[in-house]
C-alpha cells in the first residue's frame, strides 16, 4: 500500500547560510558547494533539473548533467533537435535546479541560454567514451520510435561506419551555455525556517551582483 505521502517529512539541520558570510559573487560559493556535493553525492552531484518553455508558454523539465562552468556561465550538452533544443531555439531562457539531499542543499539558477561555439563542442565530444559518441548519432532524441531493436540496428550501422576511424561530432549535437541572471542558494534548517540567499544582476554583462536574504 502507498505510504501516507501527507505524513512524509524530515527535519533539516544544515549549516547556517547568511548574506554577510557569503562572497560578493555567486560562482565561488557555487564551486564550494559543488565540491562538497561531489564528496557526498558522488557521480550524481552534477545532475540538475533543466526547465524550459515551449512557444506556447508551457513548461517542461528533465534531468541533464552539468559539464562545465566558469565566469561565462554553466555548460551542458545535448541533441539540438531534441524537445529541449527546439524549445531553447524559440525561447532562449531556462532555469536549472541542483538538489543534494545529503547536504540538505539546493541551488537554483536562471538566465539566458545560447549554443557554445563549435570548437568547444568538438573538444568535449572528443573526450566522451566511444559508445557515448556513437549514441549521439544513433538517438534521434524525443522522436517516437517503434521499439528498442530500432536503436540497436542503428547502432550496428554506425559501428560499421566508424569501425576504422574516430567518431566525429554530429552537427545536431553540441553544447549550451546558461548565462545566469539569478542564482539562489538554499540551506535546509530546523522547523522549516530555511536559509535562502539570492544573487541577482542587472543583465548578463554586469559584473556586480546584488545579494539578499529571502524568507523561507
Image (cartoon, rainbow, N blue to C red):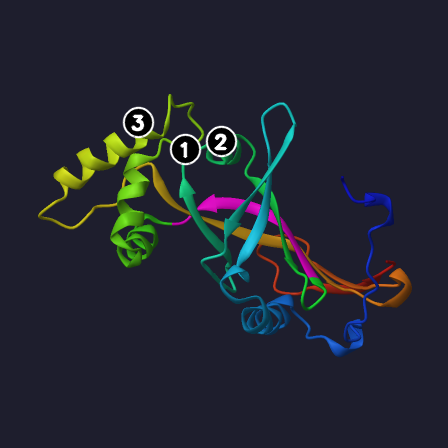
* Up-down relation of residue 115 to residue 38 (above or below): above
Instruction: Identify the mark at residue 150; answer none if there is no mark.
Output: 3
User: Alpha-carbon distance for marks 3 and 1?
Assistant: 13 Å
Q: Nearer the viewer, mark 2 or mark 1?
A: 1
The residue indicated by pointer 2 is 83
Which corner quadrant of the image does residue 213 belong to?
Answer: bottom right
User: x and y percent of residue 167 in the render?
Assistant: 20, 47
Does the magenta run of residues contain 112?
yes
Side of 40 where 141 appears, left or right: left
| N-terminal label among 3 and 2 | 2
Mark 2 surroundings: few (<14), some (14-19) or many (≥20) residues within 10 A: some
User: x and y percent of residue 94 in the render?
Assistant: 59, 43
Instruction: Identify the mark at residue 141; answer none if there is no mark.
Output: 1
Does the magenta run of residues contain 91?
no
Mark 1 surroundings: few (<14), some (14-19) or many (≥20) residues within 10 A: some
* Up-down relation of residue 195 to residue 137 (above or below): below
Dot 2: what SS?
helix
Q: Are marks 2 and 1 in contact (CB under 8 Å)?
A: yes
| Closer-to-camera residue (126/40) | 40
| Quadrant that contains the C terminus | bottom right
Side of 90 where 186 appears, left or right: right
Instruction: Identify the mark at residue 86; answer none if there is no mark.
Output: none
The majority secondary structure of the magenta stretch comes to strand
| N-terminal label among 2 and 1 | 2
Side of 99 where 75 appears, left or right: left
| N-terminal label among 3 and 1 | 1
Dot 1: what SS?
loop
Q: Which stretch did the figure color magenta?
A: 106-116
Which corner quadrant of the image does residue 146 belong to?
Answer: top left
Amino acid at each position: 500500500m502507498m505510504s501516507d505521502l501527507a505524513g512524509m517529512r524530515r527535519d533539516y539541520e544544515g549549516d547556517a547560510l547568511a548574506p554577510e558570510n557569503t562572497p560578493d559573487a555567486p560562482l565561488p560559493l557555487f564551486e564550494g558547494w559543488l565540491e562538497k556535493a561531489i564528496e557526498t553525492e558522488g557521480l550524481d552531484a552534477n545532475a540538475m533539473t533543466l526547465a524550459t518553455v515551449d512557444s506556447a508558454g508551457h513548461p517542461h523539465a528533465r534531468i541533464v548533467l552539468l559539464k562545465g562552468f566558469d565566469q561565462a556561465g554553466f555548460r551542458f550538452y545535448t541533441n539540438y533537435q531534441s524537445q529541449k533544443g527546439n524549445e531553447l531555439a524559440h525561447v532562449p531562457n531556462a532555469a536549472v535546479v541542483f538538489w543534494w539531499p545529503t547536504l540538505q542543499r539546493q541551488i537554483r539558477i536562471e538566465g539566458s541560454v545560447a549554443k557554445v561555439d563549435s570548437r568547444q563542442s568538438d573538444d568535449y565530444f572528443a573526450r566522451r567514451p566511444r559508445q557515448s559518441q556513437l549514441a549521439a548519432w544513433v538517438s534521434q532524441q524525443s522522436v517516437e520510435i517503434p521499439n528498442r531493436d530500432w536503436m540497436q540496428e542503428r547502432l550496428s550501422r554506425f559501428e560499421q561506419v566508424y569501425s576504422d576511424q574516430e567518431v566525429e561530432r554530429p552537427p545536431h549535437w553540441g553544447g549550451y551555455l546558461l548565462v545566469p541572471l539569478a542564482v539562489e542558494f538554499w540551506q535546509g534548517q530546523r522547523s522549516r525556517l530555511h536559509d535562502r540567499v539570492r544573487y541577482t544582476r542587472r543583465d548578463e554583462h554586469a559584473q556586480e551582483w546584488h545579494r539578499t536574504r529571502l524568507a523561507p
